[in-house]
Image: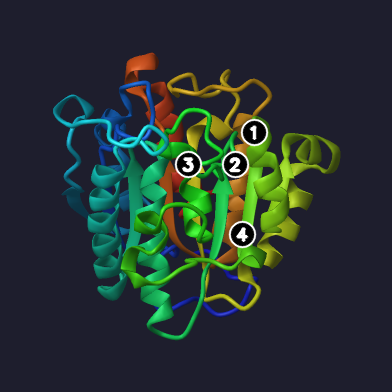
Amino acid sequence: MVESTWGELPEAHASVAGGHLQFIGVPMDLGADRRGVDMGPSAVRVAGFASKARKLGYALTDAGDIHVPTPETREVGEAQAKYLEEITHACDELRVATTLALSAKHMPIVVGGDHSIAIGTVAGVSEHFRAQNQKIGLLWVDAHADMNTPSSSPSGNVHGMPLAACLGLGPKKLTHLGGFSPKVDHDNVVLIGIRNLDDKEKEIVRRSRVHAYTMHEIDRRGLAAVMDEALGFLCRGTAGFHVSFDVDGLDPSVAQGVGTPVLGGLTYREAHLLMEMVAASGKAVSLEVTEINPMLDSLNATAEIAVGLLLSGLGKSIL
């Protein structure tokens, strides 16, 4: 059993052996130019997440996949926010699925798909706790800050915009899912592992006043010290926090099956320590893994890594 050191567990919390998990797949392949991440949910299922989670003592329900159209069947739409209508619709469906899971006292385990799916996941988690007059923290692990808006984005790819949308920046269709904005307060948002930002995006991050830990900071201070501090921000005045983990936050030597690899990322052990500390906090209310691309992988290795990280976040330990 995971012992909380950060206060009482939220009612919907399941990251203690014996809780109930709900797996939600989101085969989103609209937010980026490179194809393949729509196979991420299937890759994680094939890697045995369900059976391994059950061995930890969890009950698990697989809710199937959110319906997402393939890019070939749709028009791009706005050049600065490609496939905006389709992404909005899928994220809204995900928002509803996430709120229903939490209402049933199931912990959502959301697997993508590109990182634009986090707009829907965070909206749903925030909505659930907002109805109880509570707020959430958000831990964002990524090589990129994902804080572009259509006016700053050099590509128009929405997978570079989801954190901005969660903070109320960008198209209203994305920022106001569920009818409210922002979904999280800046002081309860932590970015870890960032190392590749667009020029205009850097200024957005600075102005946002979120807590951003670059790889330079992690190299200098160590991952444990960074996470100790980060957990304070994530838990301050919140019911708990959501973890959104983009696998490109890992170094490419650890995870090669990603569409936007960036050298100098988290090592295997740093990533597991991060998730082990998430579990030890007892305050994670939902977990999400994105950007697994089996087309760029070898023998499903990146999905296997992702499953291991999810299990660490759920309390799996060495001893």
Residue receiving disc 4? 189
Q: In the picture, residue 69 is in which quadrant? A: top left
Judged left or right of residue 213, residue 142 is: left
Among numbered discs 1 and 2, the one appearing first in the sequence: 2
Local crowd size for mark 2, using a 10 Å CA cut-off: few (<14), some (14–19), many (≥20): many
- Give the number of the mark in front: 1 or 3: 3
Local crowd size for mark 3, using a 10 Å CA cut-off: few (<14), some (14–19), many (≥20): many
Among numbered discs 1 and 3, the one appearing first in the sequence: 3
Residue receiving disc 1? 197
- CB atoms at circles 1 and 2 under 8 Å apart? yes
Q: CA distance from mark 4 to mark 1?
A: 17 Å
Image spot of residue 245 (x, y percent)? 50, 43
- Considering the numbered disc 1 on the image, is that residue within a helix, a strand or a loop? loop
Q: Which mark is residue 145?
A: 2
- CB atoms at circles 2 and 4 under 8 Å apart? no
Image spot of residue 289 (x, y percent)? 42, 43
- Considering the numbered disc 2 on the image, is that residue within a helix, a strand or a loop? loop
Q: Residue at x 57, y 30 (%)?
A: 250
Residue receiving disc 3? 150
Instruction: Name the amino acid, label 2.
Output: Ala
104 or 238: nearer the viewer: 238
Instruction: Name the amino acid, label 4.
Output: Val
Among numbered discs 2 and 4, the one appearing first in the sequence: 2
- Give the number of the mark in front: 3 or 4: 3
Local crowd size for mark 4, using a 10 Å CA cut-off: few (<14), some (14–19), many (≥20): many
310 or 241: nearer the viewer: 241
Among numbered discs 3 and 2, the one appearing first in the sequence: 2
Q: CA distance from mark 3 to mark 4?
A: 21 Å
- CB atoms at circles 1 and 3 under 8 Å apart? no
